[in-house]
Amino acid sequence: MKIFDKYAAKNVRVLNKKDATGMLMAEFGLDETEADVMFKTFDKDMNGKLSIWEFQMFCTCMGEHAQEIVAKFKELDKDNSGQLDAKEARAGLQEIKTATDRNLTQKEIDFFIQTTAGGEDGQIDLGQFTNLLYRLKLYENPPPK
């Protein structure tokens, strides 16, 4: 709340895109492209503004781990396209642990890739990757049989 309030004027709990991306860059160390992707990801009502509720969703999913998440994304993005293809995502998901501290099975990896990749190209951008990591943090299911 304190971070958001530094950028909100006159107790208005909404930031325009310029102010919101500026905040994401200044407070979370994102570059302009990353801040733009995160703005688009968390502007849930697509009104070109970031509300306090949308910002809280960003903090819940990414928050103080923003730099770690971006670094992991860049590490997996072998071709530096700014998006993960299925091969890059699969390699990353093989290393990531679930909430119960276990690796995902191949079946689960396929499921998470299918349900995360946006559009017909099957690519995963930084925002989708952030949401995927959040889902995995909450994922407590036992391995499928």
Image: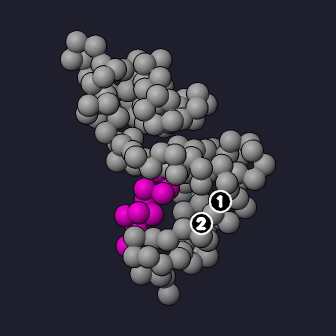
- The image shows residue 120 at horizontal and vertical percentages of 67, 46
Q: Is residue 113 left or right of residue 17?
A: right
- Say if the magenta span includes residue 42: no
The answer to which of 33 and 144 lies nearer the viewer is: 33
Where disc 2 sits, the SS reads helix
Left or right side of 21 for 84: right
- The colour style of the image is one colour
Task: Give the percent coordinates (x, y) of residue 81.
Answer: 74, 42
Compared with 144, 5 (above or below) is above
- The structure residue drawn at horizontal position 42% and vertical position 32%, both measured from the top left corner, is 27
Residue drawn 78% across the image and 49% down it: 79
Assign a secondary structure to mark 1: helix
Q: In which quadrant is the N terminus drawn?
A: top left
Amino acid, disc 1? Ala
- The quadrant where residue 15 appears: top left
The residue at which mark 2 appears reads as 93
Confirm or deny contact between disc 1 and disc 2 (CB under 8 A): yes
Q: Is residue 51 above or below residue 124?
A: above
Residue 15 or residue 32, whichever sits in front = 32
Provide the residue span drawn in magenta. 131-140
Locate residue 104, reporting x and y percent. 54, 75
Left or right of 111 in this view: 139 = left
**Amino acid type, residue under disc 2 in the picture:** Leu
List the single residue furthest toward the right. 79
Q: Position of residue 78 (x, y in %)?
A: 75, 53
Identified at 68% across, 42% down, the residue is 82
Is 12 situated above or below 136? above
The answer to which image quadrant residue 63 occupies is top left
Decide whether residue 136 is among the magenta residues.
yes
Q: Which residue is mark 1?
A: 89
